[in-house]
Image (cartoon, rainbow, N blue to C red):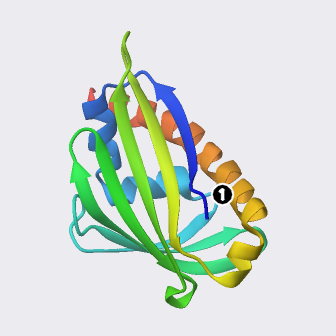
Amino acid sequence: MKSVTVSIDVPQTPEQVYDFLDVMAHHERFTNHYLTDWHYSGPGRGIGSCATVTAALGGTKTDVTIEVVETDPPRRIVERNVSAAGRRLAHGTYTIEPLLTAGSHVSFTYAWARAPLADRLLAPVVRATMRRANRTVMRRLATELVRHVSTAGS
């Protein structure tokens, strides 16, 4: 299946964005519109930080394990997502690039490495659903970054 990428420009520096995204517990704040029941394991940040969540999209619910498997501060965080009893394997990659003026361009790419037959048969619908959910994620991330940076600066 083809990957899905969404992005947003935010006024925070790449270091501020990375610092926020590096903490797994922060992800609940901007994804809890479709990822619920968060349970954390491993370190709180960085490689090995992990969460098990329930994803509710397209009228179905499934448990997902999200684990950070690669980092390149302050530019990239790669997560491995396993769901559908291991039949779905994907990687979520946050890429953070400085803007020429100020701020950052933040992209999130969801790429399937393995997908159940139903996902593959309904690929256009699955991809559209993921794109819509993750566009909302980006808007909510921008809001949470404002709260986080203003709180950290106080």
Q: How many marks?
A: 1
Mark 1: secondary structure: helix
* On screen, residue 11 above or below 124: above
The residue lying at 63 percent from left, 43 percent from top is: 135
Tell me if 154 is positioned left or right of 38 in this view. left
The quadrant the N terminus occupies is: bottom right
* On screen, residue 76 above or below 69: above
The residue lying at 73 percent from left, 54 percent from top is: 128
Q: Is residue 152 visible in the rendered structure shown here?
A: no
Q: Position of residue 56 (x, y in %)?
A: 67, 70
Tell me if 12 is positioned left or right of 55 in this view. left
Q: Position of residue 55 (x, y in %)?
A: 60, 71
Tell me which corner region of the image, top left, top right, bottom left or bottom right, holds residue 6.
top right
Considering depth in this image, is 106 or 45 the residue closer to the camera? 106
Tell me which corner region of the image, top left, top right, bottom left or bottom right, holds residue 14.
top left
Q: Position of residue 9 (x, y in %)?
A: 49, 26
Residue type beneath disc 1: Met
The residue lying at 22 percent from left, 63 percent from top is: 47
The residue lying at 22 percent from left, 47 percent from top is: 72
Which residue in the structure is indicated by mark 1? 130
Q: Report crowding for label 1: few under 14, some 14 to 19, many 20 or more residues within 10 A (C-alpha).
A: some
Q: Is residue 96 visible in the rendered structure shown here?
A: yes
Spot the residue most to the top. 101
